[in-house]
Image: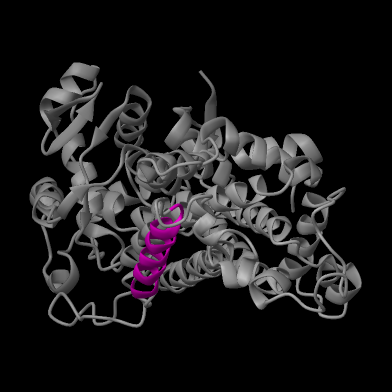
């Protein structure tokens, strides 16, 4: 079993993927243990001194002016969790829940939260033994952090709520007992430390931005196949064109298309068949490149956030100070995840337009809807409909969540980020986009079959071959959704990208 060691400062997106999807175990580094204990010592001192400190000896939100006695602190923390567990909707997926648990543990390991080491170790033990709290997907405003969904995570630590364990849906108490983990009793500051953060939106966003990077490469691959199927003009990808407008994503996309089509006999030069291609072919570097740059921007925001202290108040042990601030506010991520959704939606937009060029005989010079016996057979007619429907849905989903705010907690929390909604929407847009790209792969392969597949470039030939291993050439109408699902799985599993990179080297 492979292990990710956490200290609050060095987690990578690849680590998140390995823990969330590949079941890597998690361990605290020694320096993190020391910092956690130091911060806890400060909290204990404040309790003994009966200092008035938000969230430690006071209530929460609008109740921050109500002082809580030492004797009431345990009840305060438990009441916080059970009252805040107000999530609704379907449970978040196992991989997202594992990502949430990892990111919350990593944030706590920075040593600014004042949690007891035993409590943090309980969360890590649940993650390692596969006790996955059932966390409803809806109910977070994204400030003060992801309070409602994170409370569902903590319920299970208390032996409450529900969890999945070894495929069974159990009560939190039964799941913890089955895994051999002792439930805990929270004490001062701990409930707030566990739920006051951005880890739900960040976990969803981290998984989505990782998949978006791979989908970005797949978009280049699918477009290169379409380019060859339509005898596209390669002059538009000449590096000199892009050096005079040197956006990084544009340069990278143009380089990818050149590498993918290297050696192709299906592409043309300007003037051979036509002088110019339509924008969906000629402007692939400009369109895809803009999305690539946006995805890079979001990735950098996620990298900062997965190693950030996002709860409140923060304990600065060396100075023995507690500062109440606003690091729980999800605005930096809300804007980024809205941008991510828009960037991914654009990949679907342009892909669907390339599908239309493939199936429309007035634009392609190929048989209508890529079928040999049009009329009797519909071919790819409704596959393009499906892509168009997904693209249209994306346009609705791409409306930014971060432009909205609803005051809460009697106007104490009078501006909220809606960042978790933004992250969930980006994830849904990605799902739709993967299906659109799967349809483009199918349609491009079908169009290529009307020509000669051996004339493809080395990269596109590798992509064509793996598509054809899963989906055969369409000679007569058949149940189409099965083929679409197979190609969507090729996209989501990253197998096409892996096959192409094995053939021609790493894409940018």
Residue 485 occupies which quadrant of the picture?
top left
User: With 89 as the anchor, is 53 left or right in this view?
Assistant: right
Residue at 47% from the left image edge and 29% from the top image edge = 22
Residue 324 visible from this viewpoint: no
Foreground: 257 or 205? Answer: 257
Task: Say which residue appears at 82% left-offset and 67% top-offset.
Answer: 237
Residue 83, image x, y percentages: 8, 55
In the rendered image, residue 123, in percent from the top left (x then y), is placed at: 32, 35
Q: Is residue 245 visible?
A: yes
Magenta stretch: residue 338 in it?
no
Q: How is the image coloured?
A: one colour
Q: Is 444 left or right of 334, judged from the image as shown?
A: right
Relative to 241, 426 lies left or right = left
The vertical placement of 142 against 93, above or below, is: below
User: Of 18 and 489, which appears nearest the observer?
Assistant: 489
The residue lying at 35 percent from left, 31 percent from top is 127
**With 189 as the anchor, is 391 left or right in this view?**
right
Farthest right residue in view: 240
Q: Which residues are magenta?
A: 379-396
Looking at the picture, does residue 421 appear above or below residue 166? below
| Residue 181 locus on image (x, y percent) | 24, 22
**Rendered position, 408 above or below 206:** below
Residue located 18% across and 70% down the image: 61
Q: What kind of secondary structure does the magenta stretch mostly adopt?
A: helix
- Give yes or no for residue 387 being in the magenta stretch: yes
In percent of width and height, residue 104 lies at 38, 46
Numbered marks: total: 0
- Res 430 → quadrant: bottom left
Displayed quadrant of residue 416: bottom left
């Amino acid at each position: 079993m492979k292990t990710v060691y956490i200290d609050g400062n060095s987690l990578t997106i690849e680590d998140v993927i390995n823990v969330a999807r590949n079941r890597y175990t998690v361990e605290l580094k020694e320096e993190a243990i020391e910092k956690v204990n130091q911060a806890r010592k400060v909290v204990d001192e404040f309790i003994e001194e009966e200092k008035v400190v938000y969230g430690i000896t006071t209530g929460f939100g609008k109740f921050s002016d109500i002082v809580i006695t030492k004797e009431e602190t345990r009840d305060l923390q438990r009441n916080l969790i059970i009252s805040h567990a107000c999530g609704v909707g379907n449970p978040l997926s196992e991989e997202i829940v594992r990502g949430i648990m990892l990111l919350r543990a990593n944030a706590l390991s920075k040593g600014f939260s004042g949690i007891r080491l035993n409590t943090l170790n309980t969360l890590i033990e649940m993650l390692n033994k596969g006790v996955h709290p059932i966390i409803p997907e809806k109910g977070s405003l994204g400030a003060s952090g992801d309070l409602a969904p994170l409370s569902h995570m903590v319920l299970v630590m208390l032996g409450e709520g529900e969890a999945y364990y070894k495929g069974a849906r159990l009560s939190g108490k039964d799941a913890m007992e089955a895994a051999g983990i002792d439930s805990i009793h929270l004490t001062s500051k701990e409930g707030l430390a566990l739920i006051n953060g951005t880890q739900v939106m960040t976990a969803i966003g981290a998984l989505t931005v990782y998949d978006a990077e791979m989908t970005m490469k797949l978009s280049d691959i699918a477009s290169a196949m379409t380019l060859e199927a339509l005898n596209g003009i390669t002059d538009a990808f000449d590096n000199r064109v892009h050096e005079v407008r040197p956006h990084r994503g544009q340069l990278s996309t143009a380089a990818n298309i050149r590498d993918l089509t290297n050696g192709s006999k299906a592409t043309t030069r300007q003037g051979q068949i036509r002088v110019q291609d339509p924008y969906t072919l000629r402007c692939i570097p400009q369109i895809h490149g803009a999305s690539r740059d946006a995805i890079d921007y979001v990735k950098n925001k996620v990298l900062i956030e997965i190693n950030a202290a996002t709860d409140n108040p923060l304990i600065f042990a060396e100075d023995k100070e507690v500062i109440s601030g606003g690091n729980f506010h999800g605005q930096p991520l809300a804007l980024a995840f809205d941008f991510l959704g828009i960037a991914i939606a654009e990949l679907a937009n342009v892909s669907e337009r390339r599908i239309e060029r493939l199936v429309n005989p007035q634009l392609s010079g190929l048989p209508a809807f890529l079928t040999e016996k049009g009329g009797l057979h519909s071919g790819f007619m409704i596959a393009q409909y499906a892509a168009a429907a997904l693209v249209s849905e994306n346009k609705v989903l791409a409306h930014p969540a971060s432009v909205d705010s609803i005051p809460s907690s009697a106007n104490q929390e009078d501006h909220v980020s809606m960042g978790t909604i933004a992250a969930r929407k980006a994830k849904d847009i990605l799902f739709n986009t993967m299906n659109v790209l799967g349809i483009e792969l199918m349609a491009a392969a079908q169009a290529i079959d009307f020509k000669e597949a051996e004339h493809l470039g080395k990269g596109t030939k590798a992509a064509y071959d793996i598509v054809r291993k899963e989906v055969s050439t369409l000679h007569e109408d058949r149940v189409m959704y099965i083929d679409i699902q197979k190609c969507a799985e090729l996209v989501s599993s990253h197998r096409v990208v892996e096959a192409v990179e094995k053939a021609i080297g790493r894409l940018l």
